[in-house]
Amino acid sequence: MKILVATVGGSEEPVIAAARKLGLDKAILITGKQASEVFDEPVKNDVNPIAVSESIKKKLKNLGVKVEILAVNPFDFEECCIKTIETIEKEVSNEVNVIVSGGTKIQALAASYAAFICGCRMYYVQEAKNGSELVEIPLTFAEVDELSKSRKQALKVLVDGDDASKIAEKLKISKKTASQYLKELREYGLVEAINGKVKRYRLTFVGKICKARWG
């Protein structure tokens, strides 16, 4: 069973976009309580995340998705983190994906930390010109750190749009060897091919992180 755990604030879009991209059987919405419930004084332009979650629930239920709403204090890191961990652990036998694009910064940070602790796949929703894009946030780099120095060097010199010939020229190696390096980097999810007559490459988000880490 595919489970979506998502933080919710004032917008439905991150959850709906993630549901479309991932597909799911069940959604658990970690929803911030209304600010007026948390603070003693009145809050201007007070959004009601519970109402937003109820709207999401209605839409997802029409698609056959089971939905649960868990209300949290969106300004309490400890509460948000612990409740998210407890939620994930209850679904340990299923595939759990965590979306951290909704709610307060504290909600998103707490959910990110919970996903890291529990070893879940974690995503954020990036707004783009052609709609929303779902981007996975890598949790570990142990596997890619074991790549050889030559493969890392190929990644470090790659500029978006380079092909095997360009990499070969930069590294002073054969085109065949450069093609093999790019193939391996693609298998590790560090680069992706750009559509076109000539196979060109660009760095993925993980690839950009590794390039920054490897200097």
Image (spheres, rainbow, N blue to C red):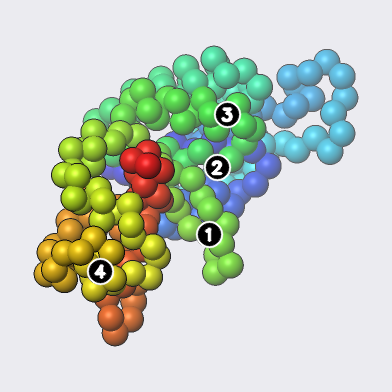
| Numbered label attached to residue 107 | 3
Per the image, the residue denoted by label 2 is: 101
Whole-angstrom CA distance, mark 3 to mark 2, is 9 Å
Amino acid type shown at disc 1: Ser
Please tell me which of labels 3 and 2 falls first in the chain. 2
State the separation of the CA atoms marked 1 and 4: 36 Å
Q: Nearer the viewer, residue 68 or 162?
A: 162
Question: Quick one: label 4 or label 2, which is nearer the N terminus?
Answer: 2
- Amino acid type at image mark 2: Ser
Judge the density around disc 4: few (<14), some (14-19), many (≥20) Cα neighbours within 10 Å: few
In this picture, is 40 found above or below 194?
Answer: above
Residue linked to disc 1:
132
Question: Pointer 1: residues within 10 angstroms few (<14), some, or many (20+)?
Answer: some
N-terminal of the two: label 1 or label 3? Answer: 3
**Looking at the image, is 187 positioned above or below residue 120?**
below
In this rendering, position of residue 200 left or right of residue 70: left
Residue 148 screen position, x and y as percent:
16, 44
Give me the residue at 55% from left, 32% from top.
108
1 or 4: tag closer to the N-terminus? 1
Label 3 crowd (10 A; few <14 / some 14-19 / many >=20): many
Q: How many marks?
A: 4
Q: Which residue appears at 75% of the width and 27% of the height? A: 35
Q: Residue furthest bottom?
A: 197
Residue highlighted by disc 4: 169
Q: Earlier in the sequence, mark 1 or mark 2?
A: 2
